[in-house]
Image (cartoon, rainbow, N blue to C red):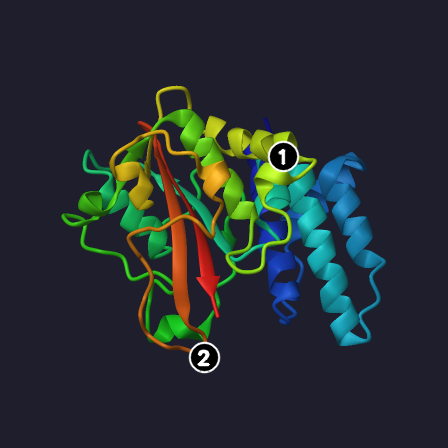
Amino acid sequence: MPLPADRTALDLLDVHLEALWDGTDPPLPREPVRLAAEREDGLLHWVLDQLRHIPREPQDAFVRQIGSLLTEFRSRRCPWNAAALRLLDDTYTFAATGPRRHEDWAHDVRAVLYRAVPDPRGWLRLDGDRGNDARHTVPAYPFDPPAAAELPSLLYPLEAAAAVAALGIMAEEWQSEPAPVRSRPDRDAVLADARTLLDRYGPTARYWTNATTAASDPAPDFLAAGLQGTASHGFLTSEYVNGLDLLDDLGLIAVSDDEVGVFWSFGAY
């Protein structure tokens, strides 16, 4: 477990790399540099050394290499991060965790969907729309979250094994998926990553989905259906923004005593 100073430095470095990846050029924070100089080993030292050796020009190549460095940094930082990146980084997904602050956890889920809370452990958040200018029009884009009082009526409980499968098929594409998880040679590895992500919430966590197949069965066969065969109550905005239609989605919510995890897959055309 990193010491508080290490975590602060790692968090600062993560923010710095993400800003570089977004095309801005902020000054390098002092704390990561100081700790790396003191220890001359470890993750901070490695990533700063890599950063120093990336040529700044041409700019597009620099940004690509920063993106690769950021992914590797996040993977090395935490096994949970590594599993999230392996499972979900190649598809249009949202994965974020927030604190559980209410008995009625629907309020906490909405806070995550609106990006109003950070990850309590400082772990990875997958959110390609965090800087999307569509959020000027639709603040929770691509979501249009229902009111907290309505949210539970659009969700159905899942058994733990079904939750793993629901998360696993988020590694698929909604259209023209050439290799559904059920037929992949690495099927077990995909499900192991999904299990790693959900293990974070502990053995007493409860799971909900917007998939309508769970209305009559808390253990539907998500693997057999795949994303293309899974219907759901939509949580997405109907606004047509930036030439993109949002038509399909599958969501999974994990609730523990301390945290709420939100995982979502989107079909956009």
Q: Which percent across, then down, holds residue 119?
A: 44, 43
Residue 150 at least partly seen: yes
| Relative horizontal placement of residue 3, taking residue 141 as reference (left or right) | right
**Amino acid at pointer 2:** Asn
Whether 223 is drawn above or below 229: the answer is above
Residue ranking furthest to the left: 149
Q: Which residue is mark 2?
A: 242
Instruction: Choose between 67 and 87: the one closer to the eye.
Output: 87
| Relative horizontal placement of residue 127, taking residue 155 as reference (left or right) | right
- Check residue 187 in the rendering and tell me which mark sits there, or answer none: 1
| Marker count (numbered) | 2
Q: Which of the two marks, 1 or 2, is nearer to us in this view?
A: 1
Q: Residue at x 56, y 49 (%)?
A: 172
Instruction: Choose between 23 and 187: the one closer to the eye.
Output: 187
Q: Residue at x 31, y 30 (%)?
A: 218
**Amino acid at pointer 1:** Arg
Residue ranking furthest to the bottom: 243
